[in-house]
Amino acid sequence: MKITQLNKLIGLLVIVFMMLGVQANAQENIAIVYLSRTKNTEAVAKLIHDKVGGYLVALEKQDKYPEDYQEIVAQVDRENEEGYLPPLKTKIENLETYNIIFIGFPTWDMQLPPPMKSFLTENDLSDKIIVPFNTNAGFGVGKGFDQLIKLCPDSEVVKGLSVEGGYEKKGVYLSIKGKRKDEVSRKVDNWLKEIGISR
């Protein structure tokens, strides 16, 4: 009887370790790449990371944007009009090893920010599962998700999440905190469940 119970226990332990191994591999195959100016997109990225694990990386351009709001708006407008792709400081080693890549960005000029366009243009994301998420000042994602799909023609782009963040023009910066952060966390939970990605 004792031998039988011991065998059952060993069997259960083997199953548990196998499940943990699968879980660890899933987390190792996830990257969360985000661009954030007022830390709202960063807040969402960290919520996602808490829920699914993976490699969390902030996207930075070589030369920082101006701190002044009007100056950055004017610069981004010029970059979008000219199709300029700013050089990036951030380089992700072994990007090809990640199967699921979350792409987070704020809405700038009602579209993808130029640095995120740079990232999606200079990296081959073919055959990856791309999971977009966005923060905005209440005006929505604009053309952001559509542009992302066009820049990832050989990727599987799943349904994105867009939530309201700060409103820098009115001096409202980090708004995803406290009760608002709890609300966004629940939205992230529901979204991850809907697209079938969880820890």
Image: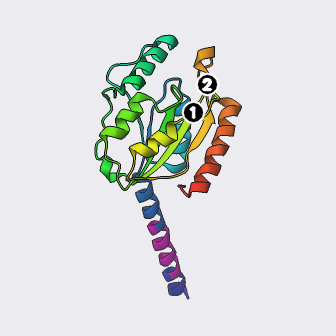
Toward the viewer: 141 or 55?
141
Q: Which residue is mark 1?
A: 135
Asked whether the viewer can see residue 68, the reply is: no
What amino acid is labelled 2 in the image?
Gly
Q: With respect to residue 117, does 86 lie above or below?
A: above
- Magenta run includes residue 14: yes
Q: Residues within 10 Å of mark 2 (few under 14, many from 20)?
A: many
For disc 2, the marked residue is 166
Where is residue 139 drawn, in percent x and y? 63, 29
Colouring scheme applied when the structure was drawn: rainbow
Quarter of the figure with the N terminus: bottom right
Q: Name the residue rendered at 30%, 27% in the picture.
A: 87
Q: Which corner quadrant of the image does residue 32 belong to? A: top left
For residue 129, say whether it is visible.
yes
Q: Label 1 amino acid?
A: Thr
Write down the quadrant of residue 169 in the picture.
Answer: top right
**Mark closest to the chain's N terminus, 1 or 2:** 1
Secondary structure of the residue carrying numbered label 1: strand
Q: Nearer the viewer, residue 175 or 135?
A: 135
Q: Residue at x 61, y 55 (%)?
A: 193
**Residue 61 vertical position relative to residue 56 in the rendered view, above or below:** above
Residues tagged 1 and 2 counted as in contact (Cβ below 8 A): yes
In percent of width and height, residue 162 lies at 59, 39
The magenta segment: 8-18
Q: Which residue appears at 52% of the width and 81% of the height?
A: 8
Q: Residues within 10 Å of mark 1 (few under 14, many from 20)?
A: many
Residue 68, placed above or below residue 30: above
